[in-house]
Image (spheres, coloured by chain):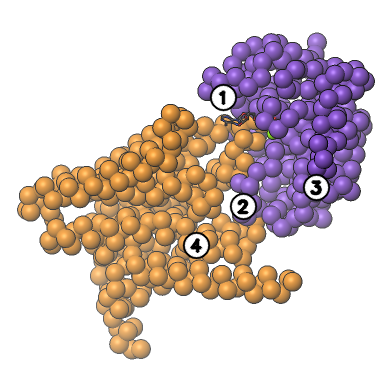
Chain colours: A orange, B purple
Amino acid sequence: MAAMLDKLVRYFSLPGVQRAFPAGVLIALCSSLLGVTLVLKRFSFIGDGLSHVAFGAMAIATVLKLSNNIPLVLAITIICAILLLRTGQNARIKGDAAVAMISVGALAMGYLIMNLAPKSSIRTGTLASDVCTTLFGSTSILTLTRTDVILCAVLSLVVVAAFVVFYNKIFSVTFDESFAKATGTRTGLYNLIISVIVAVIIVLAMNLVGSLLISALIIFPALSAMRVFKSFRSVTVCSAVLSVICAVIGLLVSILAGTPVGSTIVAADIVAFAGFSAAGAIIRGIKK
Amino acid sequence: MALLTCRDLSLGYDGREIVSGLNFEINSGDYLCIVGENGSGKSTLMKTILGLETPLGGEIVFGDGLKQTEIGYLPQQTLVQRDFPASVREIVLSGCSGRAGLRPFYSRDDKRRAAENMERMDISDLASRCYRELSGGQQQRVLLARALCATGKMLLLDEPVSGLDPRVTAEMYNLIRSLNRDDGITVIMISHDVDEAISYATRVLHIGKDVFFGTREEYLGSEAGFLYGKGSDSHGGDA
Ligand SMILES: Nc1ncnc2c1ncn2[C@@H]1O[C@H](COP(=O)(O)OP(=O)(O)O)[C@@H](O)[C@H]1O
Ligand SMILES: [Mg+2]
């Protein structure tokens, strides 16, 4: 026990960890906010596709040797989110097909670009380990540059603020878009806002858990909360709290045990999901 | 001037026509029942009136100061919301979303309105309950309360009693009639069971191969009414 504490204290005296920890927790908080919307609306597929887009954009940024990648990745992902929303509304190309095309395309191009680039342009380690970091977030949040970490924290706060302001509209548009539109809610505008928020969340989540695990970070807390809670507000609050707790546990465990940050956090989310499923089943059993 | 006038309206999707030559008008306080076979375009007509679909031809004119967004809507039941975690209060309140405009939060006035409409639909005691755990009849009352939050003038109801048992169906029809009679709300309702539904209606619109629009008495005497009434009697099985 003393040895573990000692190790934690040593880690937390590193400035990188001091920055990364709060940033990671903020990212986990904001990624869980749109979970219900993503699970229950067609946005779920868009979310998955966009995570691949973010990976492709990250590859481009890596090859360009930018001093910080986030602005470029963010811009590309937001543009793709808006394009995907447009094609989803346009019946000519089926929305799902468009998403599949863009996401697989971005994944392939991203890997290709990383391979084509001369070895020297890859910042750290071998190509394989670099791809691995981008996909699974091996150590990412702990190794991000100072500017990137601050940018992540600021973006997270912006997402939380936007979510609070548009909370009621997000509920209306997600619960029943036709009714909302028929009674004068500007669904086009709010769909656009939701897409942009999703894009920002995806880029943030990629920095915490890597691009392949983004959906898990976004969706698991919401699914867990939905097992136990019944109103939109309680589900939202519960998934936010749960996501933060899992992120803290995941980060601590990964530091102590030397496991990859992303998969450790997601593992904590999965354990929580199992616990909430059991709790939900018990509550339903008692009611009957 | 009529509250709503449809002139030579034709409806469809992607340029493919489903119904054409719809001509009718509705005055304030009317109770219009829309009947017709499955797939004849009843829901499409409603969505077009609400501005969710664009008409292929003709025009819809709103009068008496009614705006298109001031119509309350009770959609045909879909499976989409089956898993949605939402309390009754949250759903009813979302009926005020349109009137709130760009204002992000609900005002005290909106909340009072939601509470009043829950009281009116007799669902106040369900306010914190989860929508998906309610019975079919209770769910329809919740959606009706939400629609009332969006309007005081006109309600569009798409098959409000489908899937409800006979007792709850009768309650629902009584509720709708009292909204029309006592609160003066204009009602346009789509229904499947002609005999019961049109007994309260002041006007009937039949959509199908031949379109009919007129009073209930005229409809019952007309050929369309005769044939369709007969058709709906054979639901039991022997055609
Ligand atoms: N979104 C849509 N796109 C294309 N065709 C549709 C769409 N919705 C309904 N239809 C078609 O339009 C016709 C009328 O549908 P609808 O208005 O729902 O009928 P009703 O409500 O009278 O049963 C049906 O043949 C249906 O298949
Ligand atoms: Mg229909």
**Quarter of the image that includes the N terminus of chain B:** top right
Residues under numbered marks 1 and 4 in contact, where contact means CB atoms less than 8 Å apart: no
Label 4, on which residue? A221
| Disc with the residue nearer the chain's start (2 vs 3) | 2
Which residue is under mark 2? Answer: B84
Q: Which residue is mark 3?
A: B164
Q: Are marks 2 and 3 in contact (CB under 8 Å)?
A: no
Q: Quadrant of ligand 1?
A: top right
Disc nearer the start of the sequence (1/2): 1
Chain of the residue under label 1? B
Query: Which residue type does callout 1 highlight?
Result: Tyr
Real-space Cα separation, disc 3 to disc 4, in angstroms: 35 Å
Q: Do tags 4 and 2 sit on the same chain?
A: no
Q: Is residue B99 above or below residue B123?
A: above
Q: Residue at x 39, y 66 (%)?
A: A266
Using the image, name the chain to which the residue with label 2 belongs: B
Viewed as shown, does residue A7 lie left or right of B193? left
Residue farthest along the front direction in this orientation: B238
* Left or right for B123, reference B55: right
Quarter of the image for residue B224 reads top right
